Image (cartoon, grey):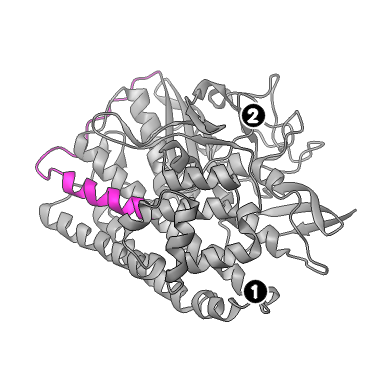
Amino acid sequence: MSRLIVGPFNRVEGDLEVQLELDAGRVREARVVSPMYRGFENLLLGRDPLDALVIVPRICGICSVSQSMAAATALAYAAGITPTPNGRHALNLMLACENAADHLSHFYLFFLPDFTRPVYAHRPWHAEALRRFAAQAGERGRAALAARQRWFTLMGTLGGKWPHTHSIQPGGSSRAIEPAERLRLLSRVRELRAFLEQTLLGDTLEAFQALPDEAALQAWAAPRLHADLPFFLQIGADLGLPTMGPGPGRWLSHGSFVQPDGSRVVPQGVFREGALGPLNVAAITEDATHAWLNEGDSAPRPPAQGLTQPAADKPGAYSWNKAPRLAGEVAECGAIARQLAAGQPLVRDAVARWGSTVHTRVLARVLELTRLVVWMEGWLQALQPREPWCAPCPLPEQAEGVGLVEAARGALGHWLRVERGRIAQYQIIAPTSWNFSPRDAAGQPGPLEAALVDAPVRPGETTPVAVQHIVRSFDPCMVCTVH
């Protein structure tokens, strides 16, 4: 048995380190370390509740809209208000814009460059992968970066700026959209649609979304290797990605994109054993047994009673991340959880066949990217320019609120308590907190820690490429994890 420490990982938001125990060319045990403390929850204590809308977007420069949405939702809950219909659509558009950009960035800029590594130089597809995806030089990577830059001009119209827009409010959006602006926004969405259809898929979004199962996906991909998703599927089949990095078999979705009638485009729930069940939010706890944080006199704690008290010398701890659990069980979150909850047939079939793996996580993310574009086209059509965009938000002196949203990486929750008009308690559970959690008091490893077990490590590898694929399939955002 030997030990290998991998990190800091590149192409990750924030710091990440993985400690691996190796035996016979395989990972036998893994521990995921978040080596940075930030303390945003403590920064919020004693402040005016609306200050959260200014502070929490600064947690992250990638998913700042998601953090704003969670805070605004918690404040709306505390105030007992509902956003206006226009406000709902504007908030959904901003969240979808950010999520789509994250998925695009992950596929082209974070995930695919690993297939250009010299370790794969003997593979028949390597030269083509270099031409398309080499970092900073690949043809398709550069095209995706340009598409992402144009895509984000949407946020200038919708929210004033990105990141850290201040237009997201508990009652909707403070930025009204004029009729001419709606047309310009629609043209930008159609521009991304064209990029996805011509470069990513080699087909229409609707044709891809209509694929019913894995067999149809493989038949669809075979004649389209000039496009990047089919080419990736070819690479993945050669490297065994469909069976690499299995998850815990439980998926958690907070639900996303609330409509004016209160329904969600992406349902809330827990998917397990082939079926979607209800999400019991009261069963969510945080276990700090192996975190450099004090646990108080009772553990694990529900987030509404959570503590953020650093304990850097705590025995047995190895991460600044707590271990979120659902009724004591490990759960995975992300695009795969959302598409399972939404009943998307291709993702459900892929998961039934392979489980949650590198292949299915990436497939779910790409499929969700294409669905976001279609949803945004509908929300833009639904805007009513002359109707209100934001409802007033009078906050009581005493209140509690919960804001559950879906960032691109998965389930994001903010828990808020107001006393005497000031923030008395604020706790956050980020998506990477779920997926990159350390062990809990029962010794259960987090989703990534379990997924890395049995990953191959080639002789002499100091940054095992299979480990890189598995870690990046979860799309980590470590700064959100340690807030």
Residue drawn where x is 55% and y is 42% of the image: 352
Q: Residues within 10 Å of mark 2 (few under 14, many from 20)?
A: some
Residue 129 seen in render: yes
Q: Residue 378 colored magenta?
A: yes
Residue 165 seen in render: no
Decide if residue 96 is on the left or right side of residue 423.
left
Image quadrant for the C terminus?
A: top right
Residue drawn where x is 66% and y is 60% of the image: 468
Which callout, 1 or 2, points at the residue further toward the start of the chain? 1
Q: Amino acid at mark 2?
A: Glu
Task: Read off the magenta span.
Answer: 370-398
Tally of marks: 2
Identify residue for label 1. 117
Identify residue for label 2. 329
Q: Nearer the viewer, residue 71 or 88?
A: 88
Asked whether disc 1 touches disc 2, contact meaning CB atoms under 8 Å apart, the reply is: no
Residue 107 at what x, y percent from top left? Answer: 49, 62
Residue drawn where x is 44% and y is 55% of the image: 216
Query: For residue 133, which numbered disc appears in the image?
Result: none
**Vertical comparison of 386 with 130: above or below:** above
Residue projecting furthest to the left: 386
**Vertical comparison of 7 with 288: above or below:** below
Q: Quadrant of residue 157?
A: bottom left
Residue 250 at what x, y percent from top left? Answer: 58, 35
Q: Amino acid at mark 1?
A: Arg
Q: Nearer the viewer, residue 383 or 165?
A: 383
Q: Residues within 10 Å of mark 1 (few under 14, many from 20)?
A: few
Q: Residue 190 colored magenta?
A: no
Residue 84 at what x, y percent from top left? Answer: 21, 34
Residue drawn where x is 37% and y is 24% of the image: 78
